[in-house]
Image: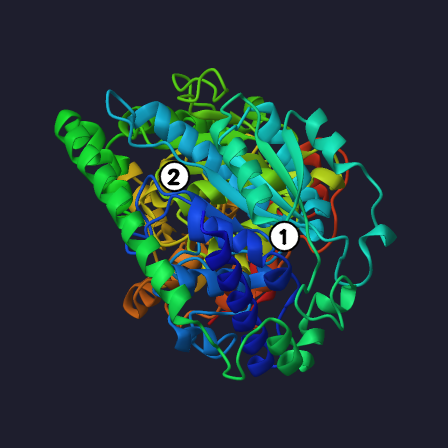
């Protein structure tokens, strides 16, 4: 390692961060300055990367969990030769730049994950480590095409967050020795010195959770490289934690080592800091020596990539079926919904089953048809029913396993499954009770922001859960999920709608999907042919009961309440239409002509029914319509009793229709 050259590069990376934050007038300088030597070692020497091939399969993945320190990443991506220009660095935090305030996946080459909410990147890194363990187990043959490391840089804020603690416990238990977590131990958080909020022995905690731990001076490049190389080479069944002692804001003496260095507080000392770092008055300065060094480094990386690519080509010729799988993954290809549905037999007429059970039935043939499909549950496989019967469990001894036992770690499950989505190889999903999706909401939101093609299976979807009471009855949760932009929420009413819901999730390439499934048995809507129920679900809404006289009333329903609406329609009369609305989001993407066919504007006598909060349904009923729902918490009693007591029954729908004028 050329320490002298990289030390110069570290000073210049500090200068880029100072100048970018000073120009923007806002940002976080503490980590970019404090970890500059770590960045120099990683991007200047140690990481197995190829800037011209930012998504090649065998690259090391670097995740900046402490995403507020984004200028650390942008500076090193620029110096390393990624498509992050000096003008991009100068446009830090500006409109439409590729250098936003926190790193965003898909916006900037070299950014592996969208990070910023603290701790999420740690969970994503664990997901990437699992993904790569599975990839090595499935795709390495006589040729080794997966042999990389997942490297994550996190600070105190990340490690204090519960999602990180859940994820590192998972990583230790499942022996993810391809994971290297670098802890920027600068003894500072945003608001105070770290001692004000923490006193634990981090090394002892991680050791107890099955990690190898070492501590180094984060400013000593040789010492850090030695720790990193040892961590990289030791595949001993233990993930690695490098505690790197650093000085936050190193390079700005006025704030260095204090909480004031965390944000932009040091930027006002930019001129004196530049002098102290040995930099010229010129802002955004990078020396010719540094440019030449990284140009040479980039050529070395390109040569290493070319060697791997030759091995990959030989492997692909020898393993055409596996190569086709990876090629599809690389292109982001998904099967069409029709292709997925072709694998799912129709349910027998008269079937009465919980949609969670129907979902379990649907998954089995899909697992056989799509070997990249994997799933997991937060200690609830017996209830969520998504276990792949022939898939085996993922363990250290069996990394080919396709079922993940996440334990009671919903938040980590969300972040880990997002890691699958970022990596792009596996069709990943997780499962738990719907009420616990609130533990996962930050991860779900980031999946939508990042357009990750992952899914979550949420069962026990309403007050129909019954005796467990209001703590487990998610009256507001479906609507809360519907409010997340880019998230498809599908709540099917029977087995055929469930089949189509899974097909929609598996075929979607541009964002996440959540499937909302019932605990209680639901009747099959056999009055509508199975094919029509499937096709209608794929369009978000369809006519489940056609009026037999002049249309005067429309009932809209979803999930378990579709059967209630169907029964009510018989009492309301021949002019009543029932519309099943499994997914508002998918329905909203349909053409205006289709939507008007389902919901003719002329018919304003509309009643929606769902066992949950009512607000969002007024988009379809209008303010002159009615919504039969539950705008309160539930109670503990048998599910059918709770439904009756809270007004989710046929008579309530009929009464609501009677109270409205015809139109």
Disc 2 marks which residue? 502
Secondary structure of residue under mark 1: loop
Seen from the viewer's position, the closer of residues 197 and 651 is: 197
Query: Can you tell which mark lies on residue 610?
Result: none
546 horizontally vs 381: left or right: left
Residue 294 point in image, percent of width and height: 37, 59
Residue 356 position (above or below residue 225): above
Residue 631 position (above or below residue 164): below
Seen from the viewer's position, the closer of residues 137 and 657 is: 137
Disc 1 marks which residue? 219
- What is the distance, in whole Å, between disc 2 and disc 1 at their CAs? 50 Å
Graded by Cα atoms within 10 Å as few (under 14), some (14 to 19) or many (20 or more), the crowding at tag 2 reads many
Task: Write the residue at 41% across / 64% down.
Answer: 290
Q: How is the image coloured?
A: rainbow
Residue 436 point in image, percent of width and height: 65, 41
Q: Can residue 349 be seen in this view?
A: no
């Amino acid at each position: 390692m050329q320490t002298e050259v990289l030390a110069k590069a570290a000073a210049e990376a500090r200068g880029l961060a100072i100048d970018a934050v000073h120009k923007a007038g806002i940002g976080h300088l503490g980590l970019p300055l404090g970890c500059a030597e770590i960045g120099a070692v990683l991007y200047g020497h140690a990481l197995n990367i190829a800037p011209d091939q930012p998504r090649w399969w065998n690259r090391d993945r670097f995740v900046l969990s402490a995403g507020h320190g984004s200028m650390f990443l942008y500076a090193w991506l620029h110096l390393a030769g990624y498509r992050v220009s000096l003008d991009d660095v100068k446009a830090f935090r500006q409109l439409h730049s590729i250098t936003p305030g926190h790193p965003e996946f898909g916006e900037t080459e070299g950014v592996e994950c969208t990070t910023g909410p603290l701790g999420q990147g740690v969970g994503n890194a664990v997901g990437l480590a699992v993904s790569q363990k599975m990839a090595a187990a499935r795709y390495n043959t006589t040729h080794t095409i997966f042999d990389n490391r997942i490297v994550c840089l996190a600070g105190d804020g990340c490690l204090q967050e519960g999602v990180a603690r859940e994820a590192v416990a998972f990583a230790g238990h499942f022996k993810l020795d391809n994971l290297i977590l670098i802890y920027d131990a600068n003894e500072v958080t945003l608001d105070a010195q770290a001692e004000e909020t923490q006193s634990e022995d981090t090394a002892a905690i991680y050791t107890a959770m099955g990690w190898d731990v070492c501590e180094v001076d984060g400013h000593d490049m040789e010492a850090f490289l030695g720790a990193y190389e040892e961590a990289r080479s030791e595949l001993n069944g233990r993930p690695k934690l490098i505690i790197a002692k650093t000085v936050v804001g190193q390079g700005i003496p006025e704030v260095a080592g204090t909480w004031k260095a965390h944000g932009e507080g040091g930027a006002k000392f930019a001129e004196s800091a530049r002098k102290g770092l040995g930099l010229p008055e010129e802002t955004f300065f990078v020396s010719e020596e540094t440019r030449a060094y990284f140009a040479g480094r980039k050529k070395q990386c390109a040569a290493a990539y070319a060697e791997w690519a030759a091995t990959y080509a030989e492997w692909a010729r020898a393993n055409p079926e596996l190569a086709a799988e990876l090629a599809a993954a690389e292109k982001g290809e998904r099967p069409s919904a029709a292709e997925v549905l072709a694998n799912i037999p129709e349910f027998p007429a008269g079937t009465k089953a919980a949609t969670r059970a129907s979902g379990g039935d649907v998954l089995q043939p899909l697992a056989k048809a799509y070997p990249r499909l994997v799933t997991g549950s937060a200690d609830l496989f017996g209830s969520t029913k998504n276990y792949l019967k022939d898939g085996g469990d993922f363990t250290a001894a069996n990394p080919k396993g396709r079922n993940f036992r996440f334990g009671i770690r919903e938040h980590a499950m969300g972040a880990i499954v997002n890691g699958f989505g970022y990596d792009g190889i596996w069709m990943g999903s997780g499962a738990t009770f719907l009420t616990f999706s609130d533990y996962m909401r930050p991860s779900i939101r980031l999946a939508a922001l990042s357009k990750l093609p992952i899914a979550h299976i949420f069962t026990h979807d309403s007050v129909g859960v019954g005796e467990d009471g209001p703590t487990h009855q998610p009256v507001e949760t479906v609507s809360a999920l519907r409010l997340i932009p880019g998230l498809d929420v599908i709540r099917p009413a029977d087995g055929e709608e469930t089949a189509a819901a899974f097909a929609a999730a598996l075929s979607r390439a541009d964002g996440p999907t959540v499937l909302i499934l019932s605990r209680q048995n639901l009747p099959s809507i056999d009055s509508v042919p199975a094919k029509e129920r499937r096709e209608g679900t794929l369009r978000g809404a369809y006519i489940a009961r056609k009026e037999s006289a002049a249309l005067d009333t429309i009932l809209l329903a979803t999930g378990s309440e579709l059967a209630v609406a169907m029964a009510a329609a018989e009492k309301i009369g021949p002019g009543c239409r029932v519309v099943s609305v499994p997914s508002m989001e998918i329905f909203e993407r349909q053409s205006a002509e289709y939507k008007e066919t389902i919901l003719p504007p002329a018919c304003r006598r509309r009643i929606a029914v769902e066992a949950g909060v009512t607000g969002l349904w007024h988009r379809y009923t209008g303010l002159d319509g009615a919504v039969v729902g539950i705008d309160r918490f539930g109670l503990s009693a048998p599910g059918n009793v709770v439904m009756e007591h809270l007004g989710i029954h046929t008579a309530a729908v009929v009464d609501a229709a009677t109270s409205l004028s015809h139109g």
